[in-house]
Image (cartoon, grey):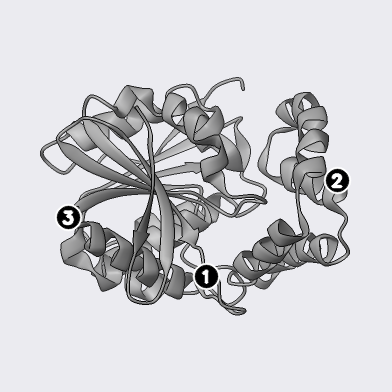
Amino acid sequence: MINLQTVQTDTFTMDYCQFGHGAQTLVILPGLSLQKVLGTAEAIAQAYRLLTDECTIYVFERRNELPAVYSVHEMAEDTARAIQALGIGPVSIFGASQGGMMAMDIAIHHPALVSRLILGSTSARLTDAQCDQFESWRRLARAGSTEALCLAFGEAIYPAGVFARVKEPLRALARSVTEKDLQRFLILSGSLRGVDFLCDVNSIACPVLILGSRDDRVLGVDASLEIAQALPEGAGCELYLYDGYGHAAYDLAPDYKARMLRFLQTREPVFPAPRTGKHSP
């Protein structure tokens, strides 16, 4: 059963869904998207069904009342306040892409709120070259070129074979994107330039699982390696690198949720050497 709810604080409201019945609480923070993710709540619950016996899962949107300028740190602070308002902490957090940046920020500034951290295809420091790609998406959004934006976004996050299969669904998605969606996308994507908290990652004290991709064409494999190297020795870091799934490994890799589950079930920190998983998407 999926519960769609809204949490209210003194300054904003935030939509979320809840599913699963396990003893652990897992918060999922999605990445940058063209539309709100809770419109696909049923699909999200299906994708994470393997975790529902172990976890009660909360998936949070960004706040409903978006300011004109909204930093990743402010997104993280708002999400932390939403978690506190619901009284569900401490929690494990899985953040993908921009959501992973938020997850790290929460672990840095609210350590008592986070028991475990799973980071998918994310970075603690964005380069000018990476931000230039985001700016190319923003130019399409400002021009109202929704089909070109959806295709450019898909081509960047998916491997070539997958992108070829999803072109038509992406074109269909573009027809449902509204002017409000584009304005929301511009605000959220505008938060990415200037992100750099790599020097603060060494304050994360909870165990961390990093799931990256060697063929990530959005952030690159170095982003995952940098996080692993910056984490404090003894914190409990596990790093696994995929091949063949690109930035969207969190959606495509068939063993992704099983790796998350094993990490969440592990009672003692683990320290394996970095590995590469080779599969065919």
Please state which of the two labelled residues, at mark 1 or mark 3, is closer to the viewer: 1
x, y (%) of residue 236?
20, 50
Q: Could you tell me which quadrant the C terminus lies in?
A: top right
Of the residues under marks 2 and 1, which one precedes in the sequence?
1
Position of residue 235 in the picture relative to residue 109 (left or right): left
Could one spot residue 102 in this view of the protein?
yes
Could you tell me which secondary element the residue under label 1 belongs to?
loop
Which residue is rendered at x = 52% and y = 52% of the image? 97
Q: Which residue is mark 1?
A: 65
x, y (%) of residue 126?
57, 68
Rate crowding at label 3 as few (under 14), some (14 to 19) or many (20 or more) other CA atoms within 10 Å.
some
x, y (%) of residue 154?
73, 41
Q: Quadrant of residue 108?
A: bottom left
Which residue is rendered at x = 23% and y = 63% of the image? 84
Residue in front for this viewpoint, 161 or 46: 46
Q: Evaluate if marks 3 and 2 touch, with contact meaning CB atoms under 8 Å apart.
A: no
Q: Which residue is mark 3?
A: 90
Q: Amino acid at mark 1?
A: Glu
Please determine whether, in this image, residue 265 is positioned above or below residue 17. Answer: above
Please determine whether, in this image, residue 71 is positioned above or below residue 215. Answer: below
Between marks 2 and 1, how big is the CA–CA gap? Answer: 26 Å
Rate crowding at label 1 as few (under 14), some (14 to 19) or many (20 or more) other CA atoms within 10 Å.
few
Q: Amino acid at mark 2?
A: Glu
The tag on residue 147 is 2
Position of residue 107 in the picture relative to residue 196 (left or right): left
Q: Could you tell me which quadrant the N terminus lies in?
A: top left
Could one spot residue 226 in this view of the protein?
no
Which residue is rendered at x = 80% and y = 48% of the image? 152
Which residue is rendered at x = 83% and y = 51% of the image? 146
Q: Amino acid at mark 3?
A: Pro
